[in-house]
Image (cartoon, helix red, strand yellow):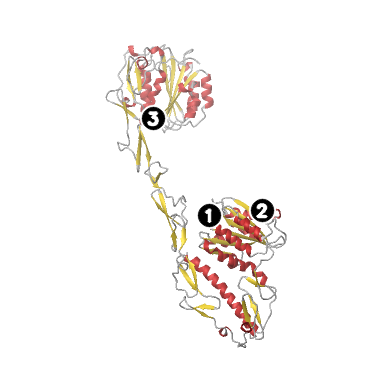
Amino acid sequence: MRQLCVCVSVLLALATMAVARPKEGPEQKCKSGPVDLIFIIDSSRSVRPHEFETMRKFMIDIIHTLDMEANATRVGVVQYSSQVQNEFSLKTHGKLQGMVKGINEIVPLAQGTMTGLAIKYVMNHAFTAAEGDRPKVPNVAVIVTDGRPQDRVVEVAAEARDKGIEIYAVGVARADLTSLRAMASPPIEDHVFLVESFDLIYQFGLQFQDKLCGMDLCLESDHGCEHLCESSPRSFHCLCLPGYTLNEDGKTCKAIDLCAGGKHDCEQICIPSPGTFTCGCNTGYTLNDDKKTCTMIDLCAEGKHDCEQICITSLGTFTCNCKTGYTLNDDKITCTMIDLCAEGKHDCEQICIASPGAFICDCSAGFKLHDDKKTCTSYSFESMSVCVCPSTDLCNTVEHGCEHQCISTPDSYYCICPEGQLLAEDGKGCRTCRSANIDLVLLIDGSKSVRPQNFELVKQFVNQVVDSLDVSAHGTRVGLVQYSSHVRTEFALKMYEKTDDIKKAVMNVEYMEKGTMTGLALKHMMENSFSEAEGARKNIPRVGLVFTDGRSQDDITEWAKKAKEEGITMYAVGVGKAMEDELREIASEPLDKHFFYTTDFTFINQIAENLKLNVCAEESQGEIEVKDPCACESLVEFQQATMSTLEQLKTKHILLYTALVH
């Protein structure tokens, strides 16, 4: 590459750009070797009028420092946008005044940015003998642009450099640095300039310092400039870095504090830096995407709290509270139900049933609640039938041997058991209700919202269910799966054959915490838990029980539907913040037998009791015997059935009332 030998004085600083430049005498010209110089000027629509005027002055300032004799420097100017326009060629003007006039008469094209087309024009037309290019004289092109080229520049710039054209790429404001580097000659650091505004392109003049211009006072004298020294023939002056302004002494600089001057639009805090600023926010606020305004940090809305029930937000922090009927514990996080029954703050005659901050009264078996909803009275046996039976009561006259309750008939008596138990083979004792031969998989929620103390209640609930089952290798098999953000099989169907082993394994389960991926748990149950590899048996009824305390973080619809389509009987048990719609979607029909909900973990033992009744219902099924409705045996059976129904209605009423309170 031919060596450029151009001597240029450093242009005036931004603070003095508007001051008229004094005319230089012939003795001030830089005596340099010959050079053919083409300015390639971007006049696209993105270049504003005042910016184009700055670029026009930039070219005039450059040529004022050049030796314009016939054998020295020749200058041409090309402007481009969507097209290329030659303003004047290398041979057009032989004198400085003609060049200045030609530059001042340029009218911007104000269209696109076809930089590659401009380089190609300069290579093929501007640097030709017909346009004044001289052989063996260095060819230099200075490209000034403020945007990204709309055509390809890599190949055409490489071709121009191969032909010996030395290219300087000056980018302003929005210019693309990658494109500038692709156009410029090596070394890149000497041929690429990127400045923040057109007012700063004077800095580019520093690249045209020529060793032939004589002594550089900035380099060879103690100039005393605090920031920058700018040379001019036989003189110098001081400049400041962007963001600073020159003091009255002409040498030192002070930072331009836009915050102190009120020249900012920060909503809360302005943080100054020289000539610019950044915005910040007060404690408890966060900066918005506009980098100007602030929004209060709401830890409650973002879920960044550990309140069990209610989160109350305040500036950058939060406090916890409880729902009606609960009181905040000493940890200021968790809540405890206000149990008026346990505190004796009730007026029930027989049974007090607690709900958060309230209670309802009930009566023992054989009694009914009065209209005052507090006192009780016994059922009238005769009022329940149109028949009149003999008054002989063998239960009171013989040693009947019934374990629980004896019912008299005209000529005999028989024993009955409490709800949830069946009569033993001897007709006197009672045995725990055992389920049919099933494969049961329990899916228990181990998410963070359950909390460790409640997770222990969940494990007790599981063991209550297990106690109601006839667990054996050929009887009922039980598997347990825990889920949160992921799913973990605690033990498979084939693992345990004894109730005690299962209950021990349940109590050893470790709490997972994290999220609530109920859909993922149902998928795991379908694909793994009920597989033969994990102990599921052919032609054995399959039962799934899902326990959760919150909304699922993934979709449950697909796998809940598949489970029921595959013939799996699904039970859904929800506590607290569990979504009833999701539970109903999981549960099999009829919903009243397969869907359970309570507002508080302390009530899940009641669900376990209810669940035993449903699982055991098949054991009481058999042939229906039609009897005389007025026979005393029929009357007694009717009374038993009525009492049992009343007990079931009472249990459902308690659960419903608890749900309504919340």
Amino acid bearing label 3: Ser
Residue 334 x %, y %? 46, 56
Residue 1 x %, y %? 51, 16
State left or right for residue 653 relative to residue 622.
left
Dot in front, 3 or 1: 1
Residue at x-position 59% and y-position 78%: 642
Question: As displayed, is residue 409 above or below residue 158?
Answer: below
Tell me which label, 3 or 2, sits earlier in the chain: 3
Q: Which residue is mark 2?
A: 528
Amino acid bearing label 2: Asn
Quadrant housing residue 206: top left
Q: Which residue is mark 1?
A: 452
Dot in front, 2 or 1: 1
Q: Are marks 2 and 1 in contact (CB under 8 Å)?
A: no
Residue 520 x %, y %? 60, 53
Residue 560 x %, y %? 61, 58
Q: Which residue is mark 3?
A: 197
Mark count: 3
